[in-house]
Amino acid sequence: MIEAGLPLEGVRVVEMTHMVMGPTCGMILAQFGAEVIKVEPPAGDKTRTLGGMGTAFFPLFNRGKRSVVLDLAIPADRDTMHRLLETADVFLENFRDGQLEKQGLNTEELRRLHPHLIVAGHKGFLSGPYEHRPALDEVVQMMSGLAAMTGTKEKPQRVGSSANDIMGGMFGVIAILAALYQKRGGKRDGADIRIGLFENCLFLVAQHMVDYEMTGNKPRSMPEREHAWPIYDIFDAADGGRIFIGVVTEGHWQSFCREFGLAEFLDDPALRTTTDRILARSRIIPRVAEIIRQRNVGELSQRLDALNICFSPINRPEDLLTDPHVLRPGGLVNNINADGKPFRVPALPVEWNGSHIGEGLKVAPLGADTSAVRAEIDNNDVTSKAAGRRA
């Protein structure tokens, strides 16, 4: 469902993507009002039937799109694809270099036949020595150092979601919006955009690269890092839960110690400054842990919230389905899978004119819109020819 009043109404996107990065780009464009037509082979996008940790891939990243089946090995369907691209503003793809050519879509021919088109290719790498390589989220996390920063050099650990794929799709959206804005300013030709999964991950670890560039100090991984605050830790609670607490300002320190009966810290002249407290963490943290262990997560959350101190229970993804903030109106939107079954998903992390977007999006069954889109193309051809005769 495309909601009224969204900014990309009237923009047509033709998408030939699979897995996560490319589909994420199309999904976000669709939620902002673009008409996104997903072109699939006769067997369908392979992620339609993924199981395990990939079960959510297709419904999550392909909501709000139309599905058209074309067999690009057939000349008539290749012709249909070109006629469809003639009506489009944007073409999304995320195949390795050379794969489009194997499907009968030569990139040079695309630029020649459809100079108006914004072509956004989501790739493993930007142009350079590695441009020929395939890539996965986990591959680029290992290459970029993100896995070593999340875990350790000896035991690297990938981030627990398809973070780079999703963020790569977001950079695709940013670049496409820039190209659409440029065309709005009068530019007639389209744009050739390449988005790199590896370079996206470099962007994420840039803070550590620049830190080393400026200081010469090798950045320490998250588990090994030196703490910049006296209390910035995970603690066990009385009910078996766990909670993270971050005491990061002088006011927080004062109010935390008063609230939890730690007057001995406030009266200690050796703990007057933040630096003093950081150096004394070896005795501060065990004492704090002893006090926190006497209280339940719920009580701790209420008291810390009242003090305006940063905290969080240690949640798992399933816990968020009962979180009161997630369950606020608009926090979760109701969508419909291709089999007709409803599912809930977090709304895009933006509010548009005070409202959330994405409610009621549907996942199209394979080829559900093929006939309708073919008819629209035929009608467009008739209209164009009539306009040509009038001219």
Image (cartoon, grey):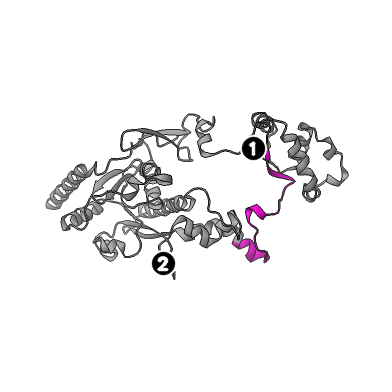
* Residue type, numbered disc 1: Arg
Name above or below for residue 68 compared with residue 134: above
Residue at the bottom extreme?
129
Marker count (numbered): 2
Name which of mark 2 and mark 1 comes first in the sequence.
Answer: 2
Give me the disc on residue 131: 2
Name above or below for residue 27 compared with residue 152: above
| Front-most of residues 223 and 372 | 223
Q: Is residue 354 left or right of residue 271?
A: left
Residue at the left extreme?
389
Q: Residue at x 64, y 34 (%)?
A: 240
- Residue that badge 1 annotates: 242
For the question of whether residue 344 can be seen, the reply is yes
| Front-most of residues 31 and 321 | 321
Q: Mark 1 Cα within 10 Å, few/some/many (few <14, many 20+)? A: some
Where are the magenta residues, as a range? 209-236
Q: Residue at x 52, y 30 (%)?
A: 322
